[in-house]
Image (cartoon, grey):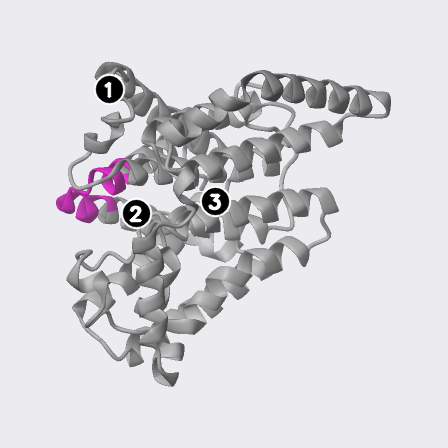
Amino acid sequence: MRIPFSVSLAFHCFLIFTFVSRIIPLIGLVSIFAIILIVSNFDSFKKLEKNEIGFLILFTIIVFIMTSINTFFSLVTFFHFFISMLSLATAVVLTRSVNVYYLSSKWSLIAFQFIVVLYVLFKGLDNYPAVVPLENMVNESSANGITSYTILLQVNYAFVSYFVFKKLTFKTALITLFIALVSYGRGSILSALLILLLLTFSYIIKLKGKTIVIYFLMTFILISFITQLYWNEILFFIEANTKLSAGIVDKQRSQILNEYIEKMDLWGFFFGVDYQGTSVLNEFNSNPHNSFVRAHHIFGLPYLLIIIFSPFYLIFNKDRIFKDSIFFAILILILFFRVFSEPIVFPTLFDFYFFSIILILGKNHLPKLKSEGTVYGLN
């Protein structure tokens, strides 16, 4: 039985609200919602394709083993094991209809962006960047957090939109860039710009013959003209309104990474390193500010390897048009770049989106649709 679009959208929105708001009781409620979806649609596991089954089995074995022998084995590790398996199982159920997943991803992203932009407009930008409007939008969450969630949701939507319809998501990508700019964060700004560049380049290569040359020339002339006229103003804006002038990675994050690596012995290399005696525990309240450090800390090297290499294996191990493979690979790299400085995945509730991308990449068969109306059931 296919899960209705309304139910799928409700889960996406509830998941986003739970993760962003950080209201602890909601984790239990969204988990119950996910369990109900899994149990009531358990036949979805019978419809898995070969690549999906392979990833599901391998990931489950790795996470189970690493949880069992982890040197800092505790109830917290059990919690992460539960979150990982629940996220994966929910992704299995909600990606049986990629078309419904596409619509849910689209409208949940738009709803999230609408709320964030509305909040920014309500707070105003009069004192920006001295006062960043998104900094206090959610208790105990920085502006970087809000923009990181937006980047992840944008990558997910850009991926599934191209996968299903070969559509490029310029409108939401521009809104994502706006949100990143008002967040005063370099990582999100660079990620949003990279997404826009990828979409623009993908659009250009779809053009034919002389149209490509004309488009390139017009774009080059326009950019050169604007840069020549406003170069000083552009530099001033970047220095005054973003953190890009200070570099891509700040000193605190570099310190965290260096301390983690320095503490690593042979056992820790394979099974993870604890935070004792590092600034993660002493200064940053157990927040490593890096999804990959967090992943290695909790589940060790095997988990980290399957997370990093699985998407690329599925992207390039399929009979896929090369330019499509490059598009998907760059999107994954942009996501990895963003989560390298924010611990929003591996493992968290938002792993649902990463697992969904993995499972969709593993599909061999996808119905061809002429329009979104077909997904809604209008055509």
In primary-sequence order, the first of circles 3 and 1 is 3
The vertical placement of 34 against 194, above or below, is below
Let me know if residue 28 is in the magenta part.
yes
Residue 291 visible in the snapshot: yes
Residue bounds of the magenta highlight: 15-30
Q: Quadrant of the N terminus?
A: top left
| Residue at x 51%, y 33% (from the top left corner) | 193
The Cα atoms of the two marked residues, 1 and 2, are separated by: 42 Å
Q: Amino acid at mark 1?
A: Asn
- Mark 1 near mark 2, Cβ–Cβ under 8 Å? no
- Label 2 residue SS: helix
Q: Amino acid at mark 3?
A: Thr
Mark 2 = which residue? 34
Nearest to viewer (mark 1 / mark 2): 1
Mark 1 = which residue? 127
Nearest to viewer (mark 3 / mark 1): 1
171 vs 239, left or right, is right
**Quick one: 301 or 193, which is closer to the camera?**
193
Q: Amino acid at mark 2?
A: Ala
Farthest residue to the bottom: give it.
266
Give how far across and how far down residue 4 sits, in percent: 41, 33
Let me know if residue 323 is in the magenta part.
no
